[in-house]
Image (cartoon, rainbow, N blue to C red):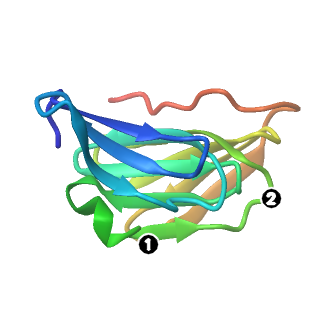
Amino acid sequence: HQSEKFLTIGSFDSKLYVYSFEQSKVVAKVEEAHESSVSTMRLKKNLLLTGSTDSTVKLWDIDNIGAGQLLRYEYHHAPASSCDLSEACNVATVGFSDGTVSLFDVRAGLKTISSKKLFGGRVTGTRFIPG
């Protein structure tokens, strides 16, 4: 699914979809990806990082999305509003609606590396700078 022939979609009703432009249809779906709305997503290589208004963060193998999540983080108390994966996909960052920005070690099961409240409002974007 790494080409531009597919689109990943997160929805307000907690679902995840993989849509094929060639086939003009949804080719994979996760009915209850989160307990609430999927509020942020980032795809790198074959890994899809999702965050939700239920405050959880999950990691999925996009090539086998129907098998369920690979990893789950659920210890923050504010909705996830932004996320990114490092170029090597070994570190994830998530911004939350309470102004917190967290870094997670993907190899250690989304273990928190750092978490700091940096702002008074919602974090609307987080991206790693390559280099």
For residue 9, side relative to residue 6 (left or right): right
Q: Is residue 77 above or below residue 87?
A: below
The Cα–Cα distance between marks 2 and 1, rounded to whole angstroms, is 21 Å
**Circle 2 is placed at which residue position?**
77
Q: Residue at x 35, y 54 (%)?
A: 29
Give the residue at the far right of this rendering: 120
Whether residue 83 appears in this view of the structure is no
Q: Is residue 79 above or below residue 111?
A: above
- First in sequence: mark 2 vs mark 1: 2
Q: Residue at x 43, y 49 (%)?
A: 16
The local secondary structure at tag 1 comes to: loop
**Circle 1 is placed at which residue position?**
108
Q: Is residue 104 above or below residue 88?
A: below
Query: Type of residue at label 1?
Result: Ala
> Which sits in the foreground, 78 or 90?
78
Return the x and y of residue 62 as percentages of the image width and height: 27, 53
The local secondary structure at tag 2 comes to: loop
**Looking at the rendering, which quadrant does residue 44 occupy?**
top left
Q: Around disc 2, counting alpha carbons within 10 Å, would you say few (fewer than 14), some (14 to 19), or many (20 or more)?
A: few
